[in-house]
């Protein structure tokens, strides 16, 4: 029998805070010594990505970029790649996923820095025609971006996943490792029991219940939901907005995506959430990732390749 | 009989699908591009974060509602960082070059070290006085204590050090989703949108109140 020879191996974890959520990185060390510098370096990636991509920090590279309209602006590799992936996803969804949604997120009141409570000043006044992802162009050779009009970029659906991937790069040498950031995660190798990692999917309406459990190794699992980070006003809209309507889509309660990278899983789960059950499911299948979409009434739509743990 | 296919026959549609299908590959390429660009090259961005993370006169968001606003400050609880570890083998396996004690292996940087280690940089224009300060915030799940380290007048870290008695730190830190995981031995981790970090905000604010 192929059961693990040793009993449960130790999972050494560290926890920090970035991107308005809790970050946990961990490695299974077994008989190996753990160089905890790897855990520190893994956590540091979240600070780096946040410093580059935060919409809530007036001194972030992203915010400074927004002040420079009409000229090519050189970007760090981090911001360039994050933006490039967001724009590629925008193109693949005909703009239903659009990083220029930041302007309307600000109008909805999602402007507060989580560390300080300070409101980032609106970068531009409400304009009659909202910007789209076609209002900026990347130069892949010079690694620059040109904004063709004032706009506000939000990379919130992209950056956290990217940070998870970069953090995981620091932990690949261990027989098992995990990076978890506010319910989005990536695992590598085996779990503390020597098997595949068992990833529970939170029920969107019952906080203490699981929808299902997925067996995962060497993949990311990210969930976009409507059940946290709502506006404070009576509309109670959540933080995901549909560029076509300017409002929160309400056909789905949560979308979970399993993909090789957290960058893809995080971004595609948000995109599928906005697209809704039918188009969202088709989009995930087209991308070759596994997905589970759940409506507010509890109806589930899954891609055929979604593997669930047999209980 | 030809197998049914969903592949578009229209060349424009087909090229669009090929583009779309490449998102996963593109994501992998992006990770390698940035990781290859290197840790050092991206380091200055982290300094920017610290420079502006917490303006000195900004109150915590009063609309934060999950936690009752019962932040309290305690200047002496920075030495309990071991609570953030879920391993029992820490002491025997830690080999970090910067670590000499079990507690340090959990947080090997100066971030939760005694304040004496964080006084090497000073500046007269600092918004905060250098040092390590701790603060506590309360949530429905229990208390969170953070150690905020100021160097050169800037926040360089704000690590969770201890949690209240209701749950250990490892649970508080990732609530609510990870509580579910711990309740079921068959689940290692939970994916799902999570609460934002109101208790953490309160704890950081309490710590920073001492640094002014």
Image: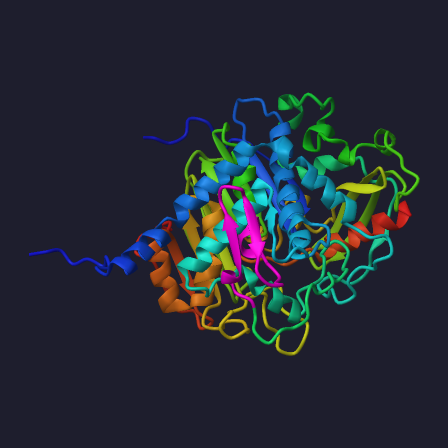
Residue A191 sits inside the magenta stretch: no
The part of the image, by quadrant, that contains residue A55 is bottom right
Per the image, is A150 magenta?
Answer: yes
Q: Is residue A284 left or right of residue A235?
A: left
Tell me residue A50's x, y (percent).
64, 47
Residue A17 at what x, y percent from top left? 68, 47
Please name the residue shown 54% across and 51% down the image.
A83
Seen in the picture, residue B117 relative to A68 is either above or below; the reply is: above
Above/below status of B66 relative to A29: below
Q: How is the image coloured?
A: rainbow
Establish if A108 lies above or below A307.
Answer: below
Of the pair A285 and A22, the residue shown nearer to us: A285
Question: Could you say where residue B180 lies in the image, as x and y percent from the top left?
Answer: 55, 53
Residue at image point 56% right, 74% down:
A129
Residue B4 falls left or right of residue A85 = left
Task: Look at the image and give the residue range highlighted in magenta.
Answer: A131-160
Residue at horizontal 21 percent and vertical 59 percent from the top = B9
């Amino acid at each position: 029998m192929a059961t693990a020879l040793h009993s449960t191996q130790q999972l050494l974890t560290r926890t920090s805070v970035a991107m308005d959520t809790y970050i946990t990185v961990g490695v299974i060390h077994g008989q190996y010594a753990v160089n905890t510098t790897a855990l520190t370096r893994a956590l540091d990636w979240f600070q780096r990505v946040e410093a580059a991509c935060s919409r809530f920090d007036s001194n972030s590279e992203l915010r400074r970029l927004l002040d420079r309209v009409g000229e090519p602006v050189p970007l760090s590799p981090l911001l360039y790649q994050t933006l490039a992936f967001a724009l590629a996803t925008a193109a693949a969804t005909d703009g239903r996923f659009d990083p220029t949604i930041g302007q309307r997120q600000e109008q909805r009141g999602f402007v507060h820095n989580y560390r300080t409570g300070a409101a980032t000043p609106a970068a531009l006044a409400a304009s009659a025609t909202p910007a789209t992802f076609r209002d900026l162009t990347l130069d892949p050779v010079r690694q620059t971006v040109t904004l063709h009009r004032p706009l506000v970029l939000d990379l919130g659906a992209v950056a956290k996943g990217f940070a998870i991937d970069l953090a995981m790069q620091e932990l690949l040498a261990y027989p098992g490792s995990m990076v978890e950031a506010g319910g989005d995660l990536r695992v590598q190798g085996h779990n503390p029991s020597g098997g595949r990692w068992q990833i529970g999917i939170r029920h969107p309406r019952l906080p203490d219940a699981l929808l299902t459990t997925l067996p995962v190794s060497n993949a990311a699992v990210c969930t976009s939901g409507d059940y946290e980070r709502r506006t404070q006003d009576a509309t109670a809209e959540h933080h995901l907005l549909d560029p076509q309507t300017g409002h929160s889509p309400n056909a789905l309660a949560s979308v979970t995506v399993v993909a090789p990278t957290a960058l893809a899983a995080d971004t595609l789960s948000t995109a599928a959430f906005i697209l809704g059950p039918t188009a969202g499911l088709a989009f995930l299948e087209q991308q070759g990732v596994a997905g589970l979409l759940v409506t507010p009434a509890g109806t589930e739509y899954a891609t055929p390749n979604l593997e669930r743990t047999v209980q | 009989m030809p197998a049914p296919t969903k592949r578009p026959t229209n060349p424009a549609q087909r090229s669009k699908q090929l583009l779309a299908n490449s998102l996963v590959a593109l994501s992998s390429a992006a990770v390698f591009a940035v990781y290859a660009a290197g840790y050092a090259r991206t380091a200055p961005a982290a300094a920017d974060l610290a420079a502006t993370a917490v303006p000195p006169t900004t109150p915590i968001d009063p609309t934060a509602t999950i936690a009752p606003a019962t932040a309290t400050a305690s200047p002496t609880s920075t030495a309990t960082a071991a609570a953030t570890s879920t391993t029992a083998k820490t002491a025997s396996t830690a080999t970090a070059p910067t670590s000499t004690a079990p507690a340090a292996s959990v947080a090997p940087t100066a971030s939760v070290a005694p304040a004496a280690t964080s006084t090497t940089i000073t500046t007269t224009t600092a918004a905060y006085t250098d040092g390590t300060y701790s603060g506590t915030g309360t949530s429905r799940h229990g208390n969170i204590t953070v150690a905020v380290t100021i160097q050169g007048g800037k926040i360089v870290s704000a690590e969770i050090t201890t949690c209240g008695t209701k749950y250990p730190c490892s649970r508080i830190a990732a609530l609510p989703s990870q509580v579910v995981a711990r309740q079921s031995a068959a689940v290692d981790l939970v994916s799902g949108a999570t609460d934002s970090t109101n208790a953490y905000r309160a704890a950081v604010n309490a710590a920073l109140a001492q640094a002014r």
